Image (cartoon, rainbow, N blue to C red):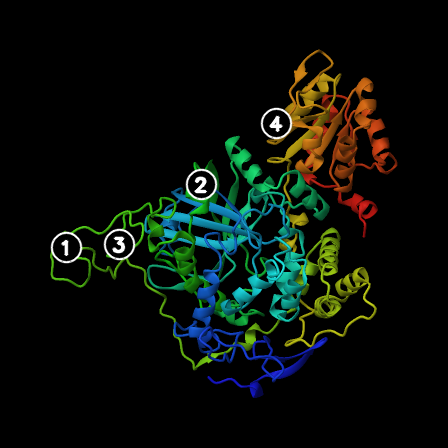
């Protein structure tokens, strides 16, 4: 299927003149002013936006030499650190099936209710290097390896259900733009720079993801309190060969929760390992994190009628249209024994499937399937990475693969090929048509071509739906995030181009960002490949605030104490917190602790300058009349209460603590989220109120915006 410039439409992207393809993708073509793009062998490239497919919605073809060379080189850019997802943290656990799913899938782990399957999970940031901090504004990887009886199955997903790009051939460009700028080597683990937003501004398919990454989803409070998604549409296939489309969702049992941006910045300074430490501590304490695996199941009829293409990884199916069916739970109950051997060496691959689960023709998924093995070879140094314990199947396995660097074991016997003439076990393992993996026999027809389906061309409608689904608080955070990120972009034209895209999403959003950037002139909207569907309804499931926890369980209360603190109040608060299934830590002026009112010694978990309030989900200040004056002179103590107030946290306090609030400058602004604690009853009521996590009504008076 040949493509020429005549097939494309000229479009103005604010200051840039580009060509638009059939799927709405942007093409910049050689015009004599810039040298033409070539392969590493010097051959000119006709299309760098689309991989070679069999038909517009068909699978990616193995013969695509340009894509293979591009992704091959990208996979080998870093040695030995992962190019993306370099900073990660893993844990062991199990998955327990709720019910038999034999009617929709032949996958063995879904056949028997109550059966448990071992899993290994790795959470990660995407853009930062191995030594970056945990609270970067970034997508989080959420990868799960199931050690099933029929081999390993990997759900290699993220904490966001959509992605930046529609075709895997653009992945190197995306990551190059997001990483440190190559001439200067900074900024680290940040997208607040020209290259990233330049790429986004010229890649309209990324606008939906841009709304998600500017939301609080990218600054989660904990791995334990974030969702996970398989991103792509997969297939379930039952024993009779019937196919059902499926999307995978991980729902945290303790509810979703994020931090605010100022809090994230301070957390990175106070504890750059905050997420790692949180997961480690929770498991070691026996507060095992849990998620439910949920499925969105639908058929070809729904796929054909749905407003968007189910093969487009930049789109979701709202839960209101296809509800998520819970089918099992995952519990993480064991930390790794050695970080390098397990977390660092674990290898995930979207191609690791088991019978009963299959791919679709999603072009991003097709490219991932091609890329991952090459990545493992680069990072782990050998095709035998599957011999490593964390990667090895827990079920028996038999094949003729042999030798290679670091081969732990080889096939035994005479035969190392098939078919062969040797009988019995001497002949080695033959194929098994009855139980072996078989691809769904989907009919594929079409001309070969570097093309994109017209059904991928709506770039703004779901971005609008996501924005309208947020609470006013969350919308404000999105506006602030766009304004901050674009304020770091030095090229005014790029800033204006992003605002021009946002006008196709929501005029109010675009105007607020433009005002925040103080643009002198509101840019015209980018000409959309398809008009925005203004009628899409809000999806409340897309809001973090609307899907938060119902209790304070799993969270942490930080209690600032001094000498002379009321021991009865301390005991009452501690009992109430522990009864709620939460944690409590004591912060003191000196790490040795304090002497309570009855002479009891209270050991401190943190010294005040090492235990700022950003480490906690809520705080209490329990001090005595004699000690508060000295406490109020300490800058970290004033920061403790002022930060907690600005970050909209609940604050409990004894009467004597009011002097500290006055010195911190918040005494006149205290609200219903600031609660006096004088006895056991008030302590219990205070802890019960903490399930709301934040006093969002406070934000308008503390926000810089």
Q: CA distance from mark 4 to mark 1?
A: 63 Å
Numbered circle sitting on residue 92: 2
The numbered mark, 3 or 2, whose residue comes first in the sequence reads 2
Residue 167: image location, x then y, percent: 51, 69
Q: Quadrant location of residue 660?
A: top right
Which element is circle 2 on?
strand
Q: Is residue 285 above or below residue 203?
A: above
On screen, residue 2 versus residue 648, left or right, reads left
Query: How far apart in space, not on screen, are marks 1 and 2 (Cα)?
Result: 38 Å
Comes first in the chain, label 1 or label 3? 3
Determine if residue 448 is in view.
yes
Residue at the spot of label 3:
403
Label 4: few (<14), some or many (≥20) within 10 Å?
A: some
| 48 is higher (above) or lower (below) than 663 | below
Spatial distance from mark 1 to mark 3, Cα to Cα? 15 Å
Give the residue pinned by disc 4.
578
Quadrant of res 160: bottom right
Q: Using residue 552 as the reference point, say whether residue 562 is left or right of it.
A: right
Q: How many C-alpha atoms fall within 10 Å of the one at disc 3: few (<14), some, or many (≥20)?
A: few
**Residue position marked by numbered label 1 in the rendering:** 414
Q: Is residue 178 above or below residue 523?
A: above
- Sequence-wise, which precedes: disc 1 or disc 2? 2
Which of discs 4 and 3 lies nearer the camera? The answer is 3
């Amino acid at each position: 299927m040949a493509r020429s410039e005549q097939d494309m439409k000229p479009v103005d992207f604010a200051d840039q003149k580009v060509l638009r393809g059939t799927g709405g993708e942007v093409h910049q073509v050689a015009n004599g002013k810039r040298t033409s793009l070539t392969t590493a062998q010097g051959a000119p490239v006709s299309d760098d936006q689309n991989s070679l497919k069999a038909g517009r919605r068909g699978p990616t073809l193995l013969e695509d030499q340009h894509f293979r060379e591009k992704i091959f080189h990208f996979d080998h850019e870093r040695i030995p650190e992962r190019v993306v997802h370099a900073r990660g943290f893993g844990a062991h656990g199990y998955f327990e099936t709720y019910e038999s799913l034999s009617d929709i899938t032949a996958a063995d782990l879904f056949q028997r209710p109550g059966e448990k399957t071992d899993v290994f999970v790795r959470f990660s940031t995407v853009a930062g290097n191995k030594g970056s901090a945990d609270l970067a504004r970034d997508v989080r990887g959420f990868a799960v390896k199931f050690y099933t009886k029929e081999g390993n199955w990997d759900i290699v997903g993220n904490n966001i259900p959509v992605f930046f790009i529609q075709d895997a051939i653009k992945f190197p460009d995306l990551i190059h733009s997001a990483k440190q700028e190559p001439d200067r080597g900074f900024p680290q683990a940040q997208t607040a720079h020209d290259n990233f937003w330049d790429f986004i501004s010229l890649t309209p398919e990324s606008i939906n993801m841009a709304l998600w990454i500017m939301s609080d989803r990218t600054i989660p409070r904990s791995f334990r309190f974030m969702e996970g998604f398989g991103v792509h549409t997969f297939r379930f296939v039952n024993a009779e060969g019937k196919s059902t489309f499926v999307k995978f969702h991980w729902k945290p049992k303790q509810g979703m929760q994020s931090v605010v941006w100022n809090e994230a910045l301070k957390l990175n300074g106070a504890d750059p390992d905050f997420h790692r430490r949180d997961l480690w501590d929770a498991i070691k304490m026996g507060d095992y994190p849990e998620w439910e695996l949920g499925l969105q199941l639908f058929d070809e009829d729904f796929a054909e009628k749905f407003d968007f293409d189910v093969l487009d990884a930049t789109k979701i199916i709202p839960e209101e249209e296809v509800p998520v069916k819970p089918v099992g739970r995952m519990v993480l109950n064991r930390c790794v024994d050695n970080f390098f051997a397990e977390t660092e060496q674990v290898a995930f691959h979207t191609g690791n499937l088991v019978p009963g689960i299959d791919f679709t023709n999603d072009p991003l998924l097709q490219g991932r399937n091609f890329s991952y093995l090459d990545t493992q070879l680069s990072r782990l140094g050998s095709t035998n990475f599957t011999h490593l314990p964390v990667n090895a199947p827990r079920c028996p396995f038999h094949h003729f693969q042999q030798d290679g660097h670091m081969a732990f074991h080889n096939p035994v016997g005479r035969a190392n090929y098939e078919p062969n003439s040797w009988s019995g076990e001497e002949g080695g393992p033959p194929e098994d048509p009855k139980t072996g993996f078989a691809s769904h026999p989907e009919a594929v027809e079409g001309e070969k071509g570097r093309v994109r389906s017209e059904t991928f061309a709506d770039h703004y409608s779901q971005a609008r739906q996501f924005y309208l689904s947020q609470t006013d608080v969350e919308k404000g955070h999105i506006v602030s995030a766009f304004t901050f990120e674009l304020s770091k972009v030095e090229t005014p034209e790029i800033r204006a181009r992003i605002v021009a895209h946002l006008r196709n999403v929501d005029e109010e959003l675009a105007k607020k960002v433009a005002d925040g950037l103080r643009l002198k002139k509101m840019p015209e909207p980018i000409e959309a490949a398809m008009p925005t569907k203004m009628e899409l309804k809000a999806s409340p499931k897309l809001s973090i605030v609307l899907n938060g926890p119902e209790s304070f369980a799993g969270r942490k209360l930080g209690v600032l104490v001094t000498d002379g603190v009321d021991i009865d109040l301390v005991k009452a608060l501690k009992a109430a917190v522990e009864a709620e299934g939460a944690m409590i830590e004591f912060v003191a002026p000196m790490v040795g602790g304090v002497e309570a009112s009855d002479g009891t010694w209270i050991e401190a978990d943190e010294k005040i300058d090492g235990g700022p309030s950003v480490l906690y989900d809520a705080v209490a200040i329990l001090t005595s009349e004699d000690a508060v004056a000295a406490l109020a002179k300490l800058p970290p103590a004033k920061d403790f209460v002022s930060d907690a107030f600005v970050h909209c946290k609940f604050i409990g306090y004894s009467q004597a603590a009011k002097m500290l609030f006055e010195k911190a400058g918040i005494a006149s602004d205290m609200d219903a989220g600031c609660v006096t604690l004088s006895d056991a009853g008030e302590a219990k009521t205070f802890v019960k109120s903490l399930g709301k996590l934040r006093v969002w009504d406070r934000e308008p008076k503390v926000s810089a915006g």
